[in-house]
């Protein structure tokens, strides 16, 4: 069974993952993008993507080829359903499968014989077949691998990256039967220029995704811990890394905040399943603890530097530059810059936040603090300035610009290593 060009594809969830994927498929297939957020659908139908993953021109080129809808009946005629909903964690760092379960229940209502449901959301091994498929069976009354089939192809979207876009990143694929696996692989291969890798099972594909970000998390945790050690020793971590990276097999990473919807979340899916199976993943959990503590550490170092420079602490005015989880991207999901802000407020500081990538008027779904207009065009002075996110707008700032909005001697805290001669650098 090969590709069927008359396949009609429904993409469930039009966020950072779903929308670019829908755009890629729409060039060759009839595609319906489904989302439960009416305002999101209205914006996309109006030709605007607030995530900035697609430009107005890219949306215009698929106008008429792709329908955006919030109506379940509109996807009933599809035979391929691709689920790209979030897989967050709860307050106890446990996997929250609610979006996946609800999506499966919804798809089950319109599922027909021979349809294929493909999941892209990051999960621990077993979720597709042990959690999602039973919901599909229950809602549809159909039998798995007889009446309908499943696939898994983990998302590999890198928000804000205009070079490594969805079609340029090799895609792992898998299916619930050997025949369906080939069908799913061929479907993705028809639009992914970088090619595909067909895994032997859905569980292998699920595991491959969750360890991608777990490995990165552990590696960054090592660099972060080294940064804490070297900071205590009075050694510049970045200079150490530059020296060490002269060896060909040294992995060059930089210390920093680990937020976002992937690296700061996915490891908990793996540790949850490992502990459920009776294994304690000490290294992975230790890495999570180190990375989760970096915001508090940065805030504490800010306070120490302010004391050294005879700055007041209580009611001090502090400016934080950048609040998204990464540079040149409006995504604020699980941003750890918030940890810096919250810790500074414990000390009684007044914190202003400026981020040119965030719409100050949009509902604060991921961030509850007020955002200010450009502070470099205002008269307010700050006791300390923290460069938290390396947006390109901040990379061009000169030292005199920082000094102009500082009280007395500027206390500059550089989290990203882009300020010349900062007061303190991570």
Image (cartoon, helix red, strand yellow):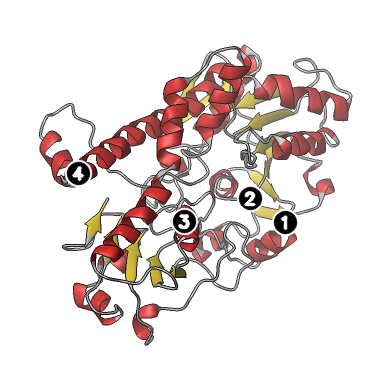
From the image, state whether disc 3 or disc 4 is nearer to you: 3
Residue ID for mark 1: 37
Q: Secondary structure at mark 4?
A: helix
**Mark toward the start of the polypeptide (3 vs 4):** 4
Residue ID for mark 3: 343
**Mark toward the start of the polypeptide (4 vs 2):** 2
Q: Quadrant of the N terminus?
A: top right
Do labels 2 and 1 touch, CB within 8 Å? yes
Measured in 3D between alpha carbons, the distance from the residue under mark 2 to the one under mark 1, in whole angstroms, is 9 Å
Residue ID for mark 2: 14
Query: Crowding at label 1, few (<14), some or many (≥20) Cα neighbours within 10 Å?
Result: few
Determine whether, in the image, residue 136 is placed left or right of residue 333. right
Measured in 3D between alpha carbons, the distance from the residue under mark 2 to the one under mark 3, in whole angstroms, is 34 Å
Determine whether, in the image, residue 44 is placed left or right of residue 218. right
Q: Secondary structure at mark 2?
A: loop
Residue at 52 percent across and 33 percent down: it is 266
Query: Crowding at label 4, few (<14), some or many (≥20) Cα neighbours within 10 Å?
Result: many
């Amino acid at each position: 069974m090969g590709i069927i060009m008359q396949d009609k594809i429904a993409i469930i969830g039009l966020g950072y993952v779903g929308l670019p994927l829908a755009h890629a498929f729409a060039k060759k297939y009839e595609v319906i993008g489904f989302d439960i957020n009416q305002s999101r659908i209205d914006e996309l139908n109006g030709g605007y993507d607030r995530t900035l993953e697609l430009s107005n021109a890219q949306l215009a080129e698929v106008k008429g080829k792709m329908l955006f809808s919030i109506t379940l009946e509109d996807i009933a005629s599809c035979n391929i359903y691709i689920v790209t909903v979030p897989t967050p964690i709860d307050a106890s760092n446990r996997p929250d499968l609610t979006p996946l379960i609800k999506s499966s229940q919804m798809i089950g209502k319109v599922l027909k014989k021979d349809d294929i449901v493909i999941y892209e959301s990051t999960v621990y091994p077993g979720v597709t077949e042990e959690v999602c498929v039973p919901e599909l069976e229950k809602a549809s009354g159909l039998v798995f691998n007889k009446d309908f089939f499943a696939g898994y192809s983990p998302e590999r979207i890198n928000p804000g990256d205009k070079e490594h876009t969805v079609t340029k990143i090799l895609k792992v694929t898998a299916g619930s039967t050997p025949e369906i696996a080939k069908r799913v692989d061929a479907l993705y291969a028809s639009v992914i220029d970088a090619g595909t890798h067909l895994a032997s099972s859905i569980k292998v594909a699920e595991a491959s995704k969750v360890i991608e970000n777990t490995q990165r998390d552990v590696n960054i945790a090592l660099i972060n811990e080294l940064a804490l050690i070297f900071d205590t020793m009075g050694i510049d971590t970045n200079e150490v890394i530059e020296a060490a990276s002269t060896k060909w097999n040294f992995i060059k990473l930089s210390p920093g905040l680990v937020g976002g919807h992937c690296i700061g979340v996915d490891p908990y899916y793996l540790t949850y399943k490992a502990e459920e199976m009776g294994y304690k993943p000490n290294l992975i959990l230790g890495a999570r603890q180190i990375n989760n503590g970096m915001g508090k550490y940065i805030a504490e170092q800010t306070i120490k530097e302010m004391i050294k420079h005879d700055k007041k602490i209580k009611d001090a005015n502090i400016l934080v530059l950048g609040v998204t989880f990464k540079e040149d991207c409006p995504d604020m999901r699980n941003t750890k810059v918030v940890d810096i802000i919250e810790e500074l407020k414990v000390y009684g500081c007044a914190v202003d936040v400026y981020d040119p990538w965030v719409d100050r008027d949009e509902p604060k779904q991921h961030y509850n603090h007020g955002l200010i207009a450009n502070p470099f065009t205002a008269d307010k002075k700050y006791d300390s300035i923290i460069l938290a996110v390396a947006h390109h707008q901040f990379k061009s700032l000169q030292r005199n610009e920082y000094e102009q909005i500082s009280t007395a001697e500027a206390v500059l805290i550089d989290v990203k290593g882009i300020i010349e001669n900062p007061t303190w650098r991570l």
